[in-house]
Image (cartoon, grey):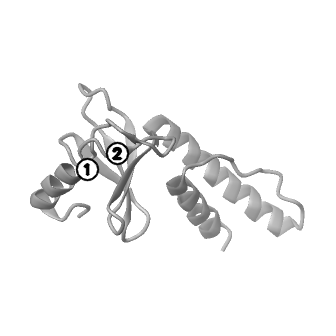
Amino acid sequence: MVFDGQEGRQKWMKKHKNKVFNKRGNISGLESCASEGWVCCMAFSEFDYLLICVEPRKAEYGNVHHINTRNEKESFCCTMDDLLIHLAYFVREGTDKKMAEHHGTKNTTTPRSGLPRPLKMIRKAIVDAMTR
Protein backbone atom coordinates (compact mmCIF):
# COMPACT_ATOMS: atom_id res chain seq x y z
CA MET A 1 0.00 0.00 0.00
CA VAL A 2 2.43 2.67 1.17
CA PHE A 3 5.52 1.51 -0.67
CA ASP A 4 3.77 -0.40 -3.45
CA GLY A 5 5.10 -3.80 -2.41
CA GLN A 6 8.41 -5.21 -1.21
CA GLU A 7 10.34 -3.88 -4.19
CA GLY A 8 9.07 -0.36 -3.53
CA ARG A 9 9.96 -0.71 0.16
CA GLN A 10 13.54 -1.70 -0.74
CA LYS A 11 13.80 1.22 -3.18
CA TRP A 12 12.51 3.68 -0.54
CA MET A 13 14.91 2.31 2.09
CA LYS A 14 17.88 2.59 -0.26
CA LYS A 15 16.97 6.16 -1.24
CA HIS A 16 16.27 7.32 2.35
CA LYS A 17 19.06 5.56 4.23
CA ASN A 18 20.38 8.15 6.71
CA LYS A 19 18.16 10.81 5.09
CA VAL A 20 15.30 10.89 7.58
CA PHE A 21 14.51 14.37 8.89
CA ASN A 22 14.44 14.80 12.67
CA LYS A 23 12.14 17.04 14.79
CA ARG A 24 14.15 20.12 13.90
CA GLY A 25 14.03 19.47 10.16
CA ASN A 26 17.66 18.35 9.88
CA ILE A 27 18.77 15.19 8.14
CA SER A 28 19.62 12.62 10.79
CA GLY A 29 20.84 9.07 11.12
CA LEU A 30 17.37 7.80 12.06
CA GLU A 31 16.34 4.47 10.61
CA SER A 32 13.96 4.61 7.66
CA CYS A 33 10.44 3.36 8.25
CA ALA A 34 10.87 1.19 5.14
CA SER A 35 13.02 -1.21 7.18
CA GLU A 36 11.65 -4.30 8.91
CA GLY A 37 9.41 -3.81 11.92
CA TRP A 38 7.50 -0.72 10.73
CA VAL A 39 3.77 -0.70 9.92
CA CYS A 40 1.40 1.93 8.62
CA CYS A 41 -0.88 3.17 11.40
CA MET A 42 -2.61 6.01 9.54
CA ALA A 43 -3.15 7.42 6.07
CA PHE A 44 -4.52 10.94 5.95
CA SER A 45 -4.23 11.69 2.26
CA GLU A 46 -3.35 9.71 -0.82
CA PHE A 47 0.29 10.74 -0.30
CA ASP A 48 0.66 11.16 3.49
CA TYR A 49 1.15 8.25 5.88
CA LEU A 50 2.21 7.69 9.47
CA LEU A 51 4.21 4.56 10.20
CA ILE A 52 5.15 3.20 13.62
CA CYS A 53 8.02 0.95 14.65
CA VAL A 54 6.44 -2.09 16.32
CA GLU A 55 9.62 -4.11 16.81
CA PRO A 56 10.34 -3.98 20.58
CA ARG A 57 14.01 -4.92 20.13
CA LYS A 58 14.75 -1.79 18.08
CA ALA A 59 15.84 1.52 19.55
CA GLU A 60 13.15 3.17 17.37
CA TYR A 61 10.35 1.15 19.02
CA GLY A 62 7.26 3.37 19.32
CA ASN A 63 8.58 6.10 17.03
CA VAL A 64 6.18 7.45 14.41
CA HIS A 65 7.47 8.67 11.04
CA HIS A 66 5.59 10.71 8.47
CA ILE A 67 6.19 9.97 4.83
CA ASN A 68 4.94 11.85 1.82
CA THR A 69 5.12 9.68 -1.27
CA ARG A 70 4.56 12.59 -3.65
CA ASN A 71 7.61 14.51 -2.42
CA GLU A 72 9.42 11.32 -1.37
CA LYS A 73 10.20 12.77 2.05
CA GLU A 74 10.41 10.94 5.38
CA SER A 75 10.55 12.60 8.77
CA PHE A 76 10.24 11.79 12.46
CA CYS A 77 6.80 12.88 13.68
CA CYS A 78 6.52 11.89 17.35
CA THR A 79 6.27 8.82 19.57
CA MET A 80 3.19 6.64 19.60
CA ASP A 81 2.43 7.79 23.16
CA ASP A 82 2.50 11.42 22.00
CA LEU A 83 0.36 10.61 18.96
CA LEU A 84 -2.35 9.09 21.14
CA ILE A 85 -2.28 12.08 23.50
CA HIS A 86 -2.58 14.46 20.53
CA LEU A 87 -5.46 12.48 19.00
CA ALA A 88 -7.38 12.53 22.29
CA TYR A 89 -6.80 16.28 22.57
CA PHE A 90 -7.95 16.86 18.97
CA VAL A 91 -11.17 14.95 19.66
CA ARG A 92 -11.74 17.01 22.81
CA GLU A 93 -11.08 20.19 20.86
CA GLY A 94 -13.60 19.15 18.19
CA THR A 95 -16.19 18.24 20.83
CA ASP A 96 -15.74 21.56 22.64
CA LYS A 97 -15.98 23.50 19.38
CA LYS A 98 -19.17 21.67 18.38
CA MET A 99 -20.73 22.28 21.82
CA ALA A 100 -19.77 25.97 21.70
CA GLU A 101 -21.33 26.35 18.25
CA HIS A 102 -24.48 24.54 19.40
CA HIS A 103 -24.88 26.69 22.52
CA GLY A 104 -23.72 29.94 20.91
CA THR A 105 -20.80 30.33 23.32
CA LYS A 106 -17.09 30.78 22.84
CA ASN A 107 -14.88 27.73 22.42
CA THR A 108 -12.47 27.64 25.37
CA THR A 109 -10.14 24.91 24.09
CA THR A 110 -7.01 26.40 22.60
CA PRO A 111 -5.24 24.67 19.71
CA ARG A 112 -1.90 23.15 20.58
CA SER A 113 1.04 25.10 19.26
CA GLY A 114 4.27 23.79 17.79
CA LEU A 115 2.76 20.75 16.13
CA PRO A 116 4.63 19.18 13.22
CA ARG A 117 2.89 19.51 9.85
CA PRO A 118 1.36 16.01 9.78
CA LEU A 119 -0.24 16.52 13.21
CA LYS A 120 -1.61 19.90 12.09
CA MET A 121 -3.21 18.18 9.10
CA ILE A 122 -4.71 15.44 11.30
CA ARG A 123 -5.95 18.02 13.83
CA LYS A 124 -7.71 20.00 11.10
CA ALA A 125 -9.34 16.87 9.67
CA ILE A 126 -10.61 15.71 13.08
CA VAL A 127 -11.94 19.10 14.18
CA ASP A 128 -13.56 19.77 10.80
CA ALA A 129 -15.20 16.33 10.74
CA MET A 130 -16.58 16.75 14.25
CA THR A 131 -18.07 20.16 13.59
CA ARG A 132 -19.97 19.31 10.40
Residue sitting at the far bottom: 132
The answer to the question of whether label 2 and label 1 lie on touching residues, with beta carbons closer than 8 A, is yes
Q: Position of residue 112 (x, y in %)?
A: 68, 47
In the foreground, 6 or 132? 6
Give the residue number, with chain letter if any, for mark 1.
16
Q: Is residue 52 above or below residue 71?
A: above
Other-residue count near label 2 (Cα within 10 Å), few / some / many at <14 / 14–19 / ≥20 = many
**SS of the residue under disc 1:** helix
Q: Position of residue 43 (x, y in %)?
A: 38, 61
Where, quadrant-wise, is the N terminus in this rendering? Answer: bottom left
Q: Position of residue 130 (x, y in %)?
A: 63, 66
In the foreground, 118 or 52? 118
Q: CA distance from mark 2 to mark 1?
A: 6 Å
Give amino acid for label 2. Val
Where, quadrant-wise, is the C terminus in this rendering? Answer: bottom right
Q: Is residue 61 above or below residue 23?
A: above
In the foreground, 32 or 122? 32
Give the residue number, with chain letter if any, for mark 2.
20
Res 31 quadrant in image:
top left
**SS of the residue under disc 2:** strand
Give amino acid for label 1. His
Q: Is residue 15 above or below residue 36?
A: below
Q: Residue at x 40, y 48 (%)?
A: 75
Q: Is residue 3 above or below residue 40?
A: below
Q: Residue at x 11, y 57 (%)?
A: 6
Compared across the picture, whether 108 is left or right of 39 comes to right
